[in-house]
Image: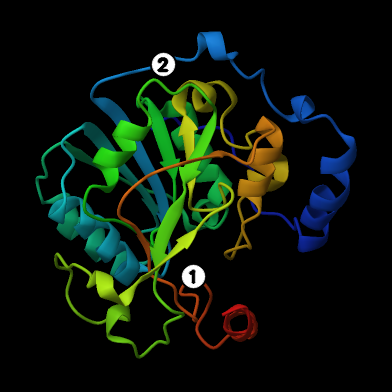
Amino acid sequence: MKITKSYPPRRYNQQAIQFFRLVTEKIVPPSWYRAPIPPVSERKALDGKLKLEIVSHCWGYGNMLTYQLSSFVNYPPNKANVTVTVFYSEEDERTSKVVEYFNALKVKNVIWNFCAISKEKLFRRGIGRNMAARSTKADWLWFTDCDIIFHENCIDSLADALQGKQEILYFPRTECTTDMLKDDDPMLRKESEPQVVDISTENFSQHSRDKAKGAFQIVHADVARAIGYCEKLKIFQTEDTRWRKTYEDTAFKWLIGSEGIPIDIDGVYQIRHVTKGRYAKDSNISKVRSKIRRMQE
């Protein structure tokens, strides 16, 4: 994994990020904050068995990561070679145990790429995504979150959908989600030992998506290698002492001038949950975020 420049922790508060979102994005050309994007003629249009890289972050979500990694074991791809990149911190003992367990499993057409980094780097998701973008050997990257499950035929249908494609950004047209689950729901199993698990798909309902938001950014690797992921936006490459609200996905779409193109992909599932594991339990921010998520539900 190529290490790109990040900045030590400092007080990049929410006001600075909001100023960028509400003002800078409206008046400054995106080209000021990125390298030139390779034109379509210079992007590979590949057919056949593709190389894909799935990139996620995990802090306090070892139970969610277990479902994600299990999906590759339960439904190994046939039409793609997949690198599963997970950024985590060794200070997160639960996640470390999950990583250790799955790293010992051999899965057809899957390479585990577990990347331990400092929690300060982990807390700013743009840092890990930029590292993956710059160093990838894949044809396509899917920037995702650890609560996304790549269920039956997901990766193979993705490989089919990307045949000959050259646009910068795609996203799944639909996904299946749970209701907003509370902490005591059996799916949010936290105390059991790491193991391969599966989901009951009848507990999920299908929804359509209208843009490549957050965990649903499928990026042409020729572009990712050329411009990184928000690499020249210092606010998204600065380490932090706690997990921050992640706006870098919106900034990335601003940089490339696209909300993404929908494609048909099977088996995209998400476990939705009220309590955010990445925030300290019972902290004020955890309580506020939980209330917001209940209101959104």
Front residue (pair 157, 228):
157
Callout 2: 10 Å neighbours few (<14), some, many (20+)?
A: some
Of marks 2 and 1, which one's residue comes earlier in the chain?
2
Q: Position of residue 140 (x, y in %)?
A: 40, 30
Query: What residue sits 62% from the left and 86% below the top?
Result: 291
Image quadrant where residue 270 sits:
bottom left
The answer to whether residue 82 shows anywhere in this view is: yes
Q: Secondary structure at mark 2?
A: loop
Amino acid type at circle 2 is Ala
Residue corresponding to mark 2: 45
Amino acid type at circle 1 is Arg
Location of the C terminus by quadrant is bottom right
Query: What residue sits 50% from the left and 38% below the top?
Result: 170
98, above or below 78, in the image:
below
Q: Position of residue 263 (x, y in %)?
A: 44, 40
Front residue (pair 106, 238):
106
Query: What residue sits 79% from the left and 26% below the top?
Result: 32
274 lies left or right of 61? right
- The image's mark for residue 278 is 1
Callout 1: 10 Å neighbours few (<14), some, many (20+)?
A: some
- The image's mark for residue 262 is none
Location of the N terminus by quadrant is top left
Q: Position of residue 199 (x, y in %)?
A: 23, 70
206, above or below 264, in the image:
below
Image quadrant where residue 25 sits:
top right
36 lies left or right of 171? right
Q: Position of residue 233 (x, y in %)?
A: 71, 38
Query: What residue sits 67% from the left and 17% below the top?
Result: 36
78 lies left or right of 24? left
